[in-house]
Image (cartoon, coloured by chain):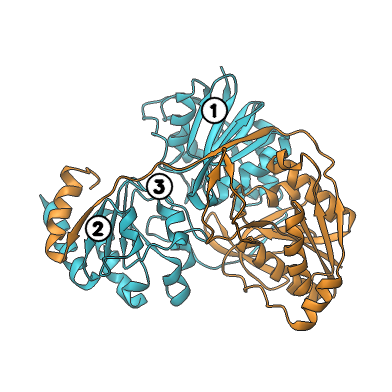
Chain colours: A cyan, B orange
Amino acid sequence: MSAYTVIGEIQNGNLSAMTAQAVGAVVNLGGTCHIIVLGQDPASAAKTAASIEGVEQVTAIRGEGFATYDSQAWAGAIDAVAEQGHIAALATPLGMDLTARLAAVRGIGIVQDVIGITDENGLSFDRPVYAGKAIQAISANGPTAFTLRGNTFAPAGGGGNAGISIVDHSAEPSVAIKEAITQASERIDVSEANIIISGGRGMGGPSNFSHLEKIADHLGAAVGASRAAVDAWDEISHSIQIGQTGKTVNPSLYIAVGISGAIQHLAGMRTSKFIVAINKDPDAPIFKHADYGIVSTWEDALPALESSLAELLSN
Amino acid sequence: MKVAALIKQVPDTTAKIILSGGGLDESNIKWSMSPFDEYALEAALSHAEAHGGEVIAITFGPERADKMLKDAAAVGAKHLFRIWNDGADALDALGVAAALAEVASSEGAEMIFTGKASADLNMSATGPGVATALNWPCISFVSEYNNDSAVRVGPAGKERVSLPKNCVITCDKGLPDLRRANVKGIMMAKKATIQLSAPTASTSNTEAGNLSSPPEKQPGRTFEGADSVSEVVQLLRNDAKVI
């Protein structure tokens, strides 16, 4: 039976909810699962990690130095406590960066952004390449570090009761923060959201994104944007850009509003489980990729969408 | 000082990807520098200008990548290196990173810039892999750079960080676009020589297999006008069960 170490990300002191997806994926492969979390004060995240079903042990690495992200220090600390075997994390920016460094430190394989995994005398992976226009198969010869695309693997349930050990570590980051520029948005990040509503250039101007936000509030959704919108309007942050030069998302529902459906955008959202497109141009390429396409201006469609949702969700 | 830009030639992001025999059909592909590597090259050039240095451009790839190196020379890269040999295409991502690190190190690079991911295979391993091989820190997902500090996306949001003396920077959108070549640059690039070397590593921990097409999406349903919105909302609840 293969041994897996899952790296749990801590966000605002809490364990990333996506960690359970990585646990679900490795338990499904029939492996043992240990979780490592690290931070200044990882106790609360470790407790959450211990409650995930299928987790056998949680190691929390604690150190003042972990206030700053430094892949060299972090990978060194994880390498010191993680047992030999496979390493799994979510394919978030930090997850991919840290996992690649850890793989390099250990001299094992790295496979990022995995959407399918099997274990038949060794791990085999499927991952999107060429902006999702093809799927690449990769087989591993031995222990492998890999990152899993979010919302792709069924999460493990709760009710676990794993032991927690806390290890103190005096990491000295070689990277120093001079200034925090923006706090992480209070709105849910697009790469973790289960529902996303995105706007493109067709929204006409950045202030009109408030209409998307209202609908997002009804659905508990994240708001995203196309590259065209991010490039055109400074008010629309690159952090919500979905596409080849932005984030890749995989929600259960993706609503594209005023987005034509350029290849660049499709690369970031085509694996969404259900896609709704609202566009006034019946020939917009996005309609070819939509499960439901609504030919309408956003000015007409969004108020109707908001009132329909309000009615539905109040019942 | 020497500043290295690690750049990769990839199918242009607008290229149609056609598969044949489990691999990429390269016959009609237009090749371009990977977009994030363009940011890296520009940042390297700007860093070298600010600190008085020269940019070395290094790529891992077959002969066709010479054109991209010449393009890099046309905008100001002084020394061009290409790593390749028979069988090099079987090397895994960290093997490639080790080969790039070896050339950068032997050429005396003090800072190394590369894209946060390549637009083709998207493995996001070059920056961390090179930094590990050199035992340097790596500052990833940098969207703003001013030669003595960088803005990156950290766990708590955007933050400005100081730059260690030697480090690897992986470049994200937000950095200045790559400058355009002028006539003088293009003339100089014609005369630029490319130094070819072979990767020393020959074993890989992972093996890339076949490429396949993603599953085709079933055709969807189209609705006309905003009056259909309430019906769509009902369908999302009752049929698709996503809200």
Q: Earlier in the sequence, mark 2 or mark 1?
A: 1
Kind of residue sitting beneath label 3: Thr
Mark 3–mark 2 contact, CB under 8 Å? no
Q: CA distance from mark 2 to mark 1?
A: 44 Å
Q: Position of residue A219 (x, y in %)?
A: 25, 54
Name the residue at 66% across, 73% down.
B178
Residue extending farthest top? A1
Q: Position of residue B242 (x, y in %)?
A: 25, 45
Q: Position of residue A127 (x, y in %)?
A: 52, 41
Callout 3: 10 Å neighbours few (<14), some, many (20+)?
Answer: many
Residue extending farthest front? B27
Residue A90 appears in the rendering: no
Q: Earlier in the sequence, mark 3 or mark 1?
A: 1
The total number of labels drawn is 3
Kind of residue sitting beneath label 1: His
Provide the residue designation for mark 2. A293
Residue A132 appears in the rendering: yes
Q: Chain of mark 2?
A: A
Provide the residue designation for mark 1. A34
- Front position in the image: B16 or A253: B16
- Seen in the picture, residue B202 relative to A16 is either above or below; the reply is above
Provide the residue designation for mark 3. A271
Q: Earlier in the sequence, mark 3 or mark 2?
A: 3
Nearest to viewer (mark 2 / mark 1) = 2
Q: Chain of mark 1?
A: A
Q: Position of residue A109 (x, y in %)?
A: 67, 35
Kind of residue sitting beneath label 2: Gly
- Seen in the picture, residue A32 relative to A70 is either above or below; the reply is above
Callout 2: 10 Å neighbours few (<14), some, many (20+)?
Answer: many
Q: Chain of mark 3?
A: A
- Looking at the rendered image, the quarter that the N terminus of chain B falls into is bottom right
